[in-house]
Amino acid sequence: MSGVLKNAIDWVSREQPQPFAGKPAAIMSASMSLLGGVRAQYDLRRAMVFLDMHCINKPEVMISTAHERFDAEGRLTDDTTREFIGKLVSALGDWTRRLQAGEQQ
């Protein structure tokens, strides 16, 4: 996890009431390496547990060799990656609705 993100989370985590608590979340990473940011995702997931966030577990989206999946203007050109991202966004929407339904009961 980058130092900037870690510091931002640390600062916001001190707010009361805790703004992260109970919020749905999804994690996605992109990296030039073959691991696609897996270690950063692990660290971020641990921070989310501490903050009492509700992170979806699947699908996991770790975009490896990201420099080969985007064009010079930053547009995603890889259809498989686009499908993975779509599934993650869809799962986050479903998870958010489930959490909201639980709050209304």
Image (cartoon, rainbow, N blue to C red):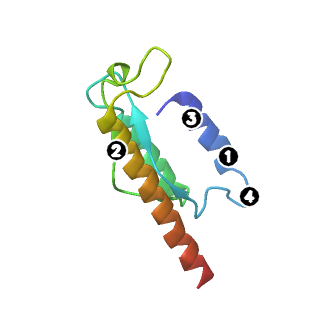
- Does residue 38 appear in this view? no
Residue farthest to the top? 72
* Residue shown at 53% from the left, 64% from the top: 96
* Residue shown at 41% from the left, 36% from the top: 29
State which mark lies toward you, 4 or 2. 2
Disc 2 + disc 1, Cβ < 8 Å: no
State which mark lies toward you, 2 or 3. 2
Q: Position of residue 104 (x, y in %)?
A: 62, 81
Question: From mark 1 to mark 4, how far is it between C-alphas?
Answer: 9 Å
Answer with the quarter of the image where residue 33 lies.
Answer: top left
Disc 3 + disc 1, Cβ < 8 Å: no
Please state which amino acid type lies under the numbered disc 4: Gln
Q: Is residue 93 above or below residue 101?
A: above
**Residue carrying label 2:** 84
In terms of sequence position, does the residue under pointer 2 or pointer 1 come before the other?
Answer: 1
In terms of sequence position, does the residue under pointer 4 or pointer 2 come before the other?
Answer: 4
Question: From mark 3 to mark 4, how far is it between C-alphas?
Answer: 20 Å
Q: Position of residue 78 (x, y in %)?
A: 33, 30
* Disc number for residue 59: none
Residue farthest to the left? 34
Left or right of 83, for residue 53:
right
**Residue carrying label 4:** 16
Question: From mark 4 to mark 2, how far is it between C-alphas?
Answer: 35 Å
Secondary structure under tag 1 reads helix
Please state which amino acid type lies under the numbered disc 2: Phe
In terms of sequence position, does the residue under pointer 3 or pointer 1 come before the other?
Answer: 3
**Residue carrying label 3:** 5
